[in-house]
Amino acid sequence: HAKQEGRGRYSFFAARMNEAADQRLAVGSALQRAIQEGEFVLYYQPKISAVDGELRGFEALIRWPQPDGEWMSPGTFIPIAEETGRIEPIGKWALHEAARQIKQWIEAGATCCPIAVNVSARQFHQASLMRDIQTALQRTGIPPGLLEAELTESAVMADPAKTIQALHQIRDLGVSISVDDFGTGYSSLAYLKRFPLDKLKVDAAFVRDIATDPDDAAIVSAIITLAHSLNLTVIAEGVETADQMAFLIEHGCDEMQGHYFSKPVPSEEALEMLKRGRFNLH
Ligand code: C2E
Ligand code: MG
Ligand code: MG
Ligand code: MG
């Protein structure tokens, strides 16, 4: 009897696994088409100075429109792109598109801010990344300081010896580096000190309850202190309320990003933000 039950359960899980595998397969081949047909779009979310509300830069977030008019979340398709070997062309596209956008804004006469491009773990450990950054810079001729790379804490800490070299190569091109989702992985403080980094991004999970949960408040203020003692800029992600903003300003966080200020927007709206140059903190 136990054996039968076990077998029943096995086939239940097998069916579920097949479903997940089918989804991966379908999304994987749709991604192939999306790359060829140029279906991706970049949206831009502003990063704001916690001192005076000045616009400090944008994060480029990839958007993939579906035939039904919805977006498929990058949280869903980026991991599949990594597993199916399609992250390289997508990452390359995002770098080129961000560089092209910077060039266009400069040509439009806007005082440009840096655009940060997300680089996934798998992409970070491929040799093609350096080449892709280099050609994006060369083809557009933009100042390299206007391009940033966002790498997750887990990608950076996965293989510290290799990472340090790769980070120096990116830095040598003049591109600055942020550690994304900081606090969700495991950082070696020794490496954090040795890595050539510019910015820590406090993960939204810690920001959510800072105004009400003393533990989260303590974690966020500790990260701010840590970042400053390592001479890094610190930015909080996922800021949604005035109370969260007030806490961050009071505790000396340098920059903020989140729906409280703006959702990620299409490039035309981002250009309007560039022209205004400032957000109201009150
Ligand atoms: P991430 O880099 O940590 O980006 C932050 C995510 O939080 C984005 O989701 C953003 O739209 C969302 N967000 C921003 N402010 C708020 C807020 O106030 N409240 C809430 N609830 N959410 C907020 P999105 O655009 O769905 O991207 C999810 C993840 O997908 C990103 O996390 C990043 O890891 C990845 N991703 C996005 N674009 C790219 C890309 O071009 N390349 C790669 N490799 N990964 C990307
Ligand atoms: Mg990011
Ligand atoms: Mg993040
Ligand atoms: Mg995140």
Image (spheres, rainbow, N blue to C red):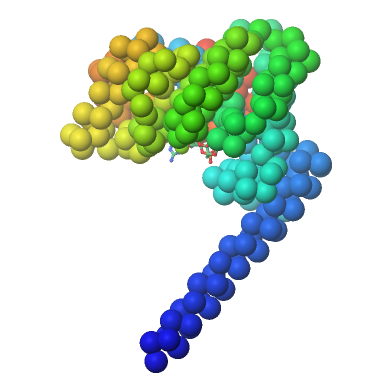
Question: Which residue is painted at 49% across and 77% down in the image?
Answer: 10
Residue at the extreme front of the image, as rendered = 161
Residue at the extreme right of the image, as rendered = 37
Residue 111 image point, x, y percent: 61, 7
Q: Tell me if residue 46 comes above or below residue 186 in the rendering.
A: above
Q: Residue 33 vs residue 164: left or right?
A: right
Question: Which residue is painted at 30% across and 11% down in the image?
Answer: 229
Residue at the extreme left of the image, as rendered = 214
Taking depth in this image into account, of 33 and 126 the one nearest to the observer is 126
Residue 252 visible within the image: yes
Question: Which residue is painted at 47% across and 33% down in the image?
Answer: 158
Q: Residue 126 vs residue 263: left or right?
A: right
Q: Tell me if residue 22 comes above or below residue 261 in the rendering.
A: below
Residue 44 visible within the image: no
Q: Tell me if residue 52 comes above or below residue 162 in the rendering.
A: above
Residue at the extreme bottom of the image, as rendered = 1
